[in-house]
């Protein structure tokens, strides 16, 4: 099985109003883990101090970044032959940004990256904490959306917590940048995929 782990950094949380600032992609082909790669994207807007603090992506970095159509083409070349696309909280965040920006600029990402290919480690982790299983009648995407939309007070399923609770090494990786997040997500996916087929 060949799969790609994908993560985005953005200017905010709204896929219709905010923009992508970084795309990370890690390919796993026939069990061989490739080098994590990322590309900085120019969002053509000022970054807030909060976004700079969280991501450590500066205004200077994005000003020198690639245009979104180039960045999406870069991603498309990497994911087009993959069986699965893996991400953490991917279906309700990264996927929405990629679909929105792809359609807006006329890229092919929204045709290459379809819901049926997505495996969301945040949904898997949250489902395990809730003792929930995928119903026979639902697709993976329906399962992930059902689990991710369920609000449970105090329940956390972020990347760091998933690593800690699953015994996944995380000390060697910088978080809140696409490169670090795809490395951690790939490790989580390897641990969890046997539990959720």
Image (spheres, rainbow, N blue to C red):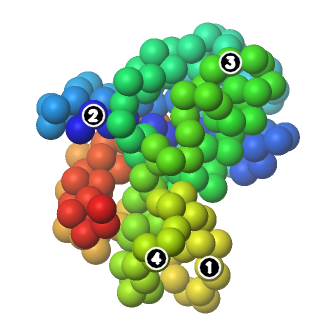
Q: At numbered mark 2, what does the secondary structure look like: helix, strand or loop?
A: loop
- Give the x, y percent position of residue 19: 74, 33
Which disc, if any, is residue 150?
A: 1
Q: Secondary structure at mark 1?
A: loop
Foreground residue among 93 and 140: 140
Compute the Cα span from label 1 to label 2. Answer: 30 Å
Return the residue at label 4. 135
Q: Nearer the viewer, mark 4 or mark 2?
A: 4
**N-terminal label among 1 and 2:** 2
Q: Mark 4 and mark 3 in contact (Cβ < 8 Å)?
A: no
Please give the label number shown on residue 131.
none
* 3 vs 4, front mark: 4
Q: Please report whichever mark, 3 or 2, sits nearer to the chain's N-terminal start.
A: 2
Q: Rounded to the nearest whole Å, what is the CA distance between mark 3 and mark 2?
A: 23 Å
Residue 56 visible in rendering? no
Q: Are marks 1 and 2 in contact (CB under 8 Å)?
A: no
Residues at marks 1 and 3, CA–CA distance in whole angstroms: 32 Å
Quarter-of-image position of residue 197 = bottom left
Q: Nearer the viewer, mark 1 or mark 2?
A: 2
Q: Which residue is mark 2?
A: 2
Q: Residue at x 75, y 17 (%)?
A: 106
**Label number found at residue 107:** 3
The picture places residue 107, in percent across and down from the top left corner, at 68, 18
């Amino acid at each position: 099985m060949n799969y790609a782990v994908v993560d985005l950094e953005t200017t905010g949380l709204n896929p219709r109003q905010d923009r992508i600032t970084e795309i990370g992609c890690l390919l796993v082909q026939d069990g061989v883990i490739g080098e994590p790669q990322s590309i900085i994207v120019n969002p053509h807007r000022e970054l807030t101090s909060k976004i700079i603090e969280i991501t450590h992506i500066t205004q200077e970095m994005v000003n020198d970044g690639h245009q979104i159509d180039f960045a999406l083409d870069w991603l498309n070349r990497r994911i087009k032959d993959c069986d699965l696309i893996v991400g953490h909280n991917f279906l309700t965040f990264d996927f929405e940004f990629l679909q929105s920006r792809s359609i807006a600029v006329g890229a092919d990402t929204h045709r290459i990256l379809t819901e049926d290919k997505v495996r969301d480690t945040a949904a898997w982790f949250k489902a395990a904490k809730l003792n929930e299983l995928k119903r026979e009648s639902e697709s993976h995407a329906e399962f992930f959306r059902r689990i991710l939309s369920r609000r449970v007070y105090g329940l956390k399923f972020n990347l760091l917590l998933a690593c800690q609770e699953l015994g996944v090494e995380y000390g060697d990786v910088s978080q809140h940048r696409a490169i670090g997040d795809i490395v951690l997500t790939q490790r989580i996916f390897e641990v969890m995929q046997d539990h959720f087929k």
